[in-house]
Amino acid sequence: MPDERVTLGKLMIDMHTGKAFLGKNAEWVWIDLLGFVWIFLGFTGLWLWWRTQTKKRDSALKRAQQAASVARITQ
C-alpha cells in the first residue's frame, strides 16, 4: 500500500462530495441529502419570514384599531 498524502484541498473536496463519509460508490447519497437540506432550509426560511410579516401586519392593524377607538371616545 503506497504512502499517499492527503492534502487539505483533497480532504475538502472529499468532504463536500461525500466521498470522505460514504465512499466513492455512495457519493450520490451525500449529494442528495445535502440537496434536501438546502430545500428544507429554504422553505423554513420563507415560512419564518412570512410569519414575521403577518405578525407585523397584525400588530399594525391592532394599533390602528386602538387609535381609532381612542379617537371615537375623545370626540
Image (cartoon, helix red, strand yellow):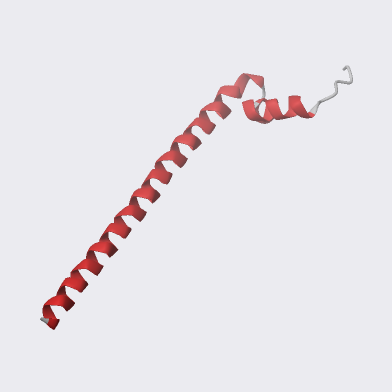
Single out the residue that lies furthest toward the front. 75
Q: Quadrant of residue 65?
A: bottom left
Single out the residue that lies furthest toward the top. 2
List x then y, in percent, for residue 71: 15, 76
Q: Quadrant of residue 26?
A: top right
Examine the rendered structure and indicate whether residue 42 appears above or below residue 12: below
Quadrant including the C terminus: bottom left
- Viewer-nearest residue: 68 or 11: 68
46 left or right of 70?
right
Q: Quadrant of residue 30?
A: top right
List x then y, in percent, for residue 53: 33, 53
Quadrant including the N terminus: top right
List x then y, in percent, for residue 9: 75, 26
Examine the rendered structure and indicate whether residue 12 appears above or below residue 42: above
- Viewer-nearest residue: 27 or 16: 16
Marks counted in the figure total 0
69 left or right of 37?
left
List x then y, in percent, for residue 6: 81, 25
Single out the residue that lies furthest toward the bottom. 74
- Viewer-nearest residue: 51 or 29: 51
> Who's the residue at 50% across and 30% down the image?
35
> Who's the residue at 23% across and 63% down the image?
61
Examine the rendered structure and indicate whether residue 73 appears above or below residue 51: below
